[in-house]
Amino acid sequence: MDQIGGVKNITRRVIYGVSSNVIAQMVNVLIQFAGVPLLLKYWGPAYYGEWLIMFTIPSFIENADFGLGGSATTEMSMLKEAGDLGRVKEILRSVFWFILLVGGIPFLLLYLSSWFVSWHDFLHLEHITAKDFNLAFPCLIAYVYLTLFLTIPVGYYRVEKVYHRERYIAVAFKLMEFGGLCLVVFTGHGVVEAALTYLVIKVCFFIVVFLDLSFKFQEFRIGFFSLHFSKIRHLFKPSLALMIIFIGQNMLIQGITTTIGIVLGPIQVVIFNTTRTLMNMAKQVVNIVNLSFISEFSYAHGQGNKALLGRLYQKVQWTNMGISFVAIAAILILGHRILEFWTNGKIDIVQPFFFLFGVSVFFNGFWSGGLILLVATNNQFKTGIYFLSISAAILLVIILFLKSGGLTLIASMLVVFEILMILVISNSCKQTLEIATWNCISLKRVRPSK
C-alpha cells in the first residue's frame, strides 16, 4: 500500500508540475509573441537589436554562483527525502550566504569595469546613446545578479515538493515585467526606463518569495551570516560541473548573439533572435516535461530506487522526442505564415538557416531529458566538461567563419553541437542508470507489495 500511495503522490506532483509549467510556458509564449512585434514597431529593428546585444554582457556571468544553487537544491531534495533535516538547514544557510557574497564579486567587477572599458563602443552600438547605455547597464547588472541570488529561495520550493507554487508566483511577476515594458514602450521611453522597470519588479519578486517561504515553511530560516565552507565543500564538484554547463549554454546563446551583433550588425541579431524565439517554442514544451520530472528524479535517487529512476527517465525520453518531432514539423511547415503574421512582414525566413535551426532543436529533444536526469542526481561532472569543450569549439568556428558563412553557418554548427551532445548524454545516462540508455523500455514496472 505504501508503494501505491507513493505512486499516487508522484502522479499528483507531476500533474501539479505539468499544469504550472504549462501556464508558465503559455505566458512565455504570449510575451514572446506579443513582445517582438511590439518592440519592432515602437523601437525599430536596429534599436531593439542593440537592446538585445546590451543584455548579453551581464548575462555572461549570470551563473557566478559556481552552479552551487542548482546542486544545493538537488542535494537538499535528496537529504530531505532521506529525513536528514539538520543537513538541509546547514546547506541552505551556507549556500545562501556564499551566493550573496562570493557570487556578487563578478557583478561588482563588471560594474567597475564600465568605468574603464567603453562597453558601448566595444559592442558597436549606434542607436542607443552612450549616456543611455551607462544608465541602463548598471540596472541590467543588478537585475541579473538578483536572478542569480534567487536560485536558492526559488529552488527551496522543490525541496518542499511544492515546485508548482513557485511557478505561479514567477508567472505573476513575469507578466508584471512585460506589463512594465509595454508601459515604457507605449509612453515613448527607451532602454533606461526598461532596465529600471525590470530591476524594480525583480526586487519585488525577491521580497515576495522570501516572505512566502519564511511564513509557509518553518525550516526556511536564513538567519544572520552563517557560512560554513566545510558543510558545502562536497557540493563544489557537481556545482562546478553545473556552472560549466551554464557557461557553455551562455556561449551558444549570449556568445553567438554578441558575435552576430559585432560582425553582422543588429538587424541580423533580430533575425537570429526572432527565429530562435520561434523555434524555442518546441523547447519550451519539452521543458514543461523536464521541469515537472526533475524533482522526481532527485527523490527517486535519494530513495536509492534505481528501477523507478529508470522508468521515469524512459517516460521523459519518449515524451520529449515525440513532442520535438510534432512541434518542429509544424513550425517548419507553417513558419513563413507565422513570421509574417507575428512581425507584420518585417522579418522573413532565411533559408537554409531556418530549416537547419529547426533540425538542431529537434535533436535537442533527444538529450535534454538526459541532462535533467544527470543534474537532478548531481552526476553531471564529466558531462559538464564535454558540454563546455564542445560549446567553446562551436563558438570558435562561428567567430572565425561567421563573416563568410553568415547565419547558415551558425545553424549548421548548432546541428553538429546537438548530435555530439546526444552521444555524450546517452553515455552518461547509461552509466548513471547502470543500464543501456536505449533499452530503458525493457525495465519492468515496480509492483506494489502484497
Image (cartoon, grey):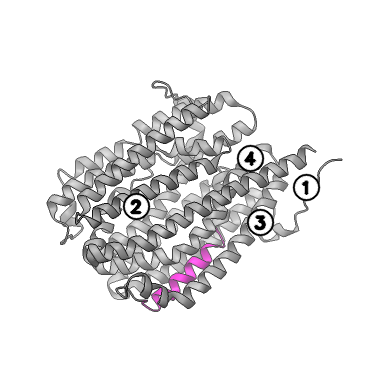
Q: Nearer the viewer, residue 254 or 142?
A: 142
Amino acid type at circle 2 is Phe
Q: Which residue is mark 2?
A: 178
Q: Is residue 366 magenta?
A: yes
Q: What stretch of residues is rendered in magenta? A: 349-367
| Residue at mark 4 | 299
The answer to whether residue 434 of the structure is visible from this angle is: no
> Spatial distance from mark 1 to mark 2, Cα to Cα?
45 Å
Which amino acid is tagged 1? Val
Residue situated furthest top in the rendering: 224
Residue at which label 1 appears? 446
Residue 238 point in image, percent of width and height: 51, 41
Residue wearing tag 3:
315
The mark that comes first in sequence, 4 or 2, is 2
Apparent side of residue 218 relative to residue 37 in the rendered image (left or right): right
**How far apart are labels 2 and 3 at the CA level?**
34 Å
Q: Amino acid at mark 3?
A: Lys
Task: Compute the Cα span from label 1 to label 3.
Answer: 14 Å
Circle nearer the N terminus (1, 2):
2
Q: Secondary structure at mark 4?
A: helix
Sequence-wise first label, 4 or 1: 4
Residue drawn at x 44%, y 55% is 27
Q: Residues within 10 Å of mark 1 (few under 14, many from 20)?
A: few
Which is nearer the N-term, disc 4 or disc 3?
4
Q: Which is nearer the eye, 208 or 398? A: 208
Where residue 194 appears, as percent x and y from the top left, is 25, 50
Q: Is residue 444 above or below residue 97?
A: below
Q: Position of residue 54 (x, y in %)?
A: 25, 54
Residue at horizontal 51 percent and vertical 63 percent from the top: 364
